[in-house]
Image (tube, coloured by chain):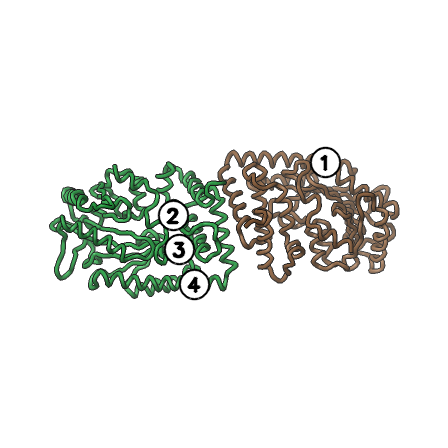
Chain colours: A green, B brown
Amino acid sequence: MKLEKILGNELSPWMTGGGLEGDIVLSSRIRLARNLDKIPFPNRADNNQLSEVLSCARGAVENLNNGSFQYYFEELDNLQALDRYLLVEKHIVSPMHVQTPQGRGLIIRSDGSVSIMVNEEDHLRIQALTRGLDLEGALELANYTDDRLEESQSFAFEESLGYLTACPTNLGTGLRASVMLHLPALVYTKQLNRLIMAATQLGLAVRGLYGEGSESTGNIFQISNQLTLGYNEQEIVENLNSMVLQVVEQERAAREFLIKGSKEVVEDTVWRAYGMLRYARSISAQEALATLSQVRLGIDVGMIKEIPAEVFNELIVLTRPSYIRKFYGVSDMEPAARDRMRATVIRNKLQGGTE
Amino acid sequence: MKLEKILGNELSPWMTGGGLEGDIVLSSRIRLARNLDKIPFPNRADNNQLSEVLSCARGAVENLNNGSFQYYFEELDNLQALDRYLLVEKHIVSPMHVQTPQGRGLIIRSDGSVSIMVNEEDHLRIQALTRGLDLEGALELANYTDDRLEESQSFAFEESLGYLTACPTNLGTGLRASVMLHLPALVYTKQLNRLIMAATQLGLAVRGLYGEGSESTGNIFQISNQLTLGYNEQEIVENLNSMVLQVVEQERAAREFLIKGSKEVVEDTVWRAYGMLRYARSISAQEALATLSQVRLGIDVGMIKEIPAEVFNELIVLTRPSYIRKFYGVSDMEPAARDRMRATVIRNKLQGGTE
């Protein structure tokens, strides 16, 4: 199975850090919601109709392949539960998509940066991920995929409404653009609530690391557009992009403020986090995220110089529960063993495996 | 002033670790209470009488000197407040002795292992400190000092009661033997209260790091005899010695129990403490003691191998507030600066000053 190979890659390109505003913006994402004409939306479709959508998706893969990248289709039912959770942690599918795998599928590009959830809330949800602040790049990737799909499929579309979607909030472009940001200084200076309110008034939403309702541990937040109707794709992306640039500016100002006003406290905090991560023998996923965030802040403001910033981006993913299970064979039934393995993974990464 | 030289030595011999049962017993101490004949006890003496005692002490110094070591006399009033506090932290004088320095004095041997408080509760309190479990050695040192003093002074003594002392609990031998122990495993396994009760029934007392009423942070405890009357010196020392050996055995059993039952928790705890001490930029005295204790436990049970056990004994003293002030010139008015300097001292000691 080719998907196994993709799952076996620890890191997708967008996880390795860098990119525009890469000290604050971790990744950019575009999602397009599409539905096949004449087949009920997944929540209304029977098993035969869901199968029909899966068949269409399987058939569309050939047309997506190009010189550089291969695409693969797989039904979620054929995957082990662990691999499904891994897909969630890699941000390739939504938590909702794997909850009931029957009748659901996935198309994925070999480097993991483009994926299509089949029979999630809509028949097809195209996702493209890029590193740093690069919504344009993600939109290009998503549009390419959309265009290739449309060559072989007929999408539900209404002249007055645009693309039809299962939930009316996605009507029109079916586009959701989102950006993942690391905002420790805005959290520490308690400015985040003000920011969330301002973003909401501008038709944007702010969420935690794993989307709707997910916790914001690690000071990582997603900002995305709420409105899909009444603006074209370009306008949505530009609107979000300019908002993100403002947030980046505010985070930078907050970092400067912290360094000026509480340099010693920040220094102590980030070095303690580093010391803990370098030596602890057992770390929970939550604690790992929280302290990795502090260490990353220390790197970004020039206090910690001995490790590269990318280590943070990598470890955010490598320390997730299913990652630990997948790559180190620790079963789900042993949370204590998983916490110990997490500490080992982090220690090896930070010490180069020397201690 | 010669005393300045002694104060300027960071470490006394007993602080550098080693000795019998040195993994658990930090130091042994003998104290002899003596009073000059025909002069009221210090709490009843007027200023002239206190001065008379100080003169006798000054005069007795010459007779104490021998080939290997010099003895020095100083009135506490002539010392700076900082140096007086330093003497407390070095366990050379009691906290009570420096509270009102007027009319009080000190005789000290050049290596700091013998000292005589003048006009504390009694006219003369001879103290001898040795490393590890070595009450015999300390008694020998104290007795030598006592004998030399008695050659030139006449002590208050009653045939039926023995040496007379200000407080009746010290009557008879005037001897208090005490041993400083590091008992982390008995604390973690919650066996210490049982031990304290057993010790009390045997006429012994268990106290914290700085004597009566002092906190027991760092899992360091003093065990000492309560009874001074009705036993001769040898019996008191042997009684305490055998009790200490039992406690040592229990602490070893508790460590083994911890390692067997909670190895991974202990490992995580001691390494986290080590990571914190290695990297923190600000550490309070309390936190330093608590985490140094954990690191020392890690060394003793063979989990931490990269630093020698003595570092713990040294850092317990080097991180006390007055030490930081004395050796690094950080004023008492800046507790934040002191906590930062403490972190620096610890970091340099643990990293060899490389980071």
Same chain check for tags 2 and 4 = yes
Estimate the spatial distance between the alpha carbons at disc 3 and disc 1, rounded to whole Å.
59 Å
Q: Report x, y in % for residue B292.
A: 58, 46
Same chain check for tags 1 and 2 = no
Residue B219 seen in the current view: yes
Q: Decide if residue A290 is on the left or right side of residue B105.
A: left
Q: Which residue is mark 1?
A: B239
Query: Which residue is more in the foreground, A60 or A87?
Result: A60
Circle 1: element type: helix
Circle 3: element type: helix
Q: Which mark is residue A238?
A: none
Query: Residue B274's quadrant in the figure?
Result: top right
Q: Which residue is mark 3?
A: A219
Q: Report x, y in % for residue A285.
A: 40, 46
Q: Residue at x 38, y 45 (%)?
A: A318
Q: Earlier in the sequence, mark 2 or mark 4?
A: 4
| Residue type for callout 3 | Asn
Q: Which residue is mark 2?
A: A314
| Residue type for callout 4 | Ala
Q: Decide if residue B162 is on the left or right side of residue A96.
A: right
Of the 4 image quadrants, the one containing the N terminus of chain B is bottom right
Q: Which residue is mark 4?
A: A254
Query: Residue B243's quadrant in the figure?
Result: top right
Same chain check for tags 1 and 4 = no
Check the residue under mark 1 and report the chain it is in. B
Estimate the spatial distance between the alpha carbons at disc 4 and disc 3, rounded to whole Å.
14 Å
Vertical relation: B75 (above or below) B155: below
Check the residue under mark 2 and report the chain it is in. A
Q: Residue at x 14, y 43 (%)?
A: A52
